[in-house]
Amino acid sequence: MALFEAHRLHKRFGRRVVLEDISLAFADGRISGIMGPNGAGKTTCFNVLTGRYAPDRGRVVLDGRDIAGKKPHEIARLGVSRSFQMMNLFDEYTARENVAMALPAMRGRGFQMARAAAGIGEIRDAADAALERVGLAGRGDAIAKALSYGERRALEIGVALAAAPRILFLDEPTSGLGTEATARLAELIRRLKGSLAMVLIEHDMRFLFELADEVSVIHWGQVIARGTPDELRRNPWVQRSNLGKLA
Ligand SMILES: Nc1ncnc2c1ncn2[C@@H]1O[C@H](COP(=O)(O)OP(=O)(O)OP(=O)(O)O)[C@@H](O)[C@H]1O
Ligand SMILES: [Mg+2]
């Protein structure tokens, strides 16, 4: 059994069915990709997998245990982290403070407590280790809003990793990044590979196909294709779509 599995997820908003029947499996230490056109339901899928929305039907299984319907913080505590399509940092706080707030030792302590602890002892060391892991060594004292866009994206991943997840969901990590920052991000993800499972939603197919072990294509609320990057390059739907041309 894979580390994380979704079985036959169904989710609707009012009368609009967004996830029709989605099954996915993410193995430990691997990079899985999710692609598909705008509005296909990719982010909604992440929202269901990480507890923001309960599915109407279906199961979400982490390590053999059904976690569907649990609250986001409960799922996070079980080792599931995510980043958001829109950046989600505390802009006025330093990089180190942002990371410190996400450390397991700071859970439930509140911002001011985490902020005070970020400057001292083991919390400071743990926060700096998390920053180093994402290539931000030496940037701990920088205010988040003063970082470059690429550094902010790395910080977001640092925050997600600080919680010591077993699986990390990244929603369009390259969005807003230029060529150079995208290359640095690919490098970062490649370095992290093997230490946890990662799932990337991506519109940048070159980026995704270079990194992913396996890719699922979501369209009309279903997984319409799945395979290795090489298999998907030969997939007729992928070839017909703009996505295929880019890859
Ligand atoms: N909370 C919500 N309430 C109502 N409709 C929603 C909600 N969240 C998402 N939707 C709808 O679900 C559909 C799928 O949206 P979703 O954000 O999952 O697509 P996506 O595949 O991530 O697209 P993109 O590539 O543009 O990010 C859209 O039509 C969207 O408007
Ligand atoms: Mg989306």
Image: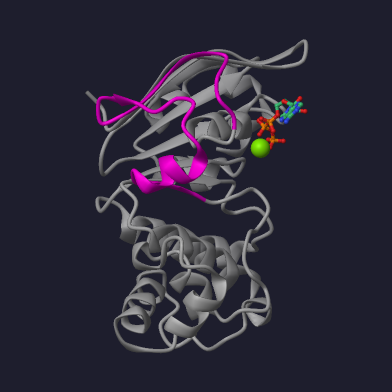
* Residue 83 image position (x, y, % from top left): 54, 51
Residue 204 quadrant: top right
Horizontal side of 128 relative to 22 (left or right) equals: left
Horizontal side of 107 relative to 178 (left or right) equals: left
Coloured how? one colour
* Residue 140 image position (x, y, % from top left): 48, 84
Compared with 226, 143 (above or below) is below
Residue ID at (62%, 40%): 203
Horizontal side of 201 relative to 63 (left or right) equals: right
Residue 81 inside the magenta-drawn segment: yes
Residue 45 quadrant: top right
Residue 36 quadrant: top right
Q: Quadrant of the N terminus?
A: top left
Question: Which residue range is magenta in the image?
Answer: 53-82
Nearest to the observer: residue 93 or residue 70: 70
Task: State which image quarter holds ligand 2.
Answer: top right
Compared with 145, 49 (above or below) is above
Q: Quadrant of the C terminus?
A: top right
Q: Residue furthest right?
A: 15
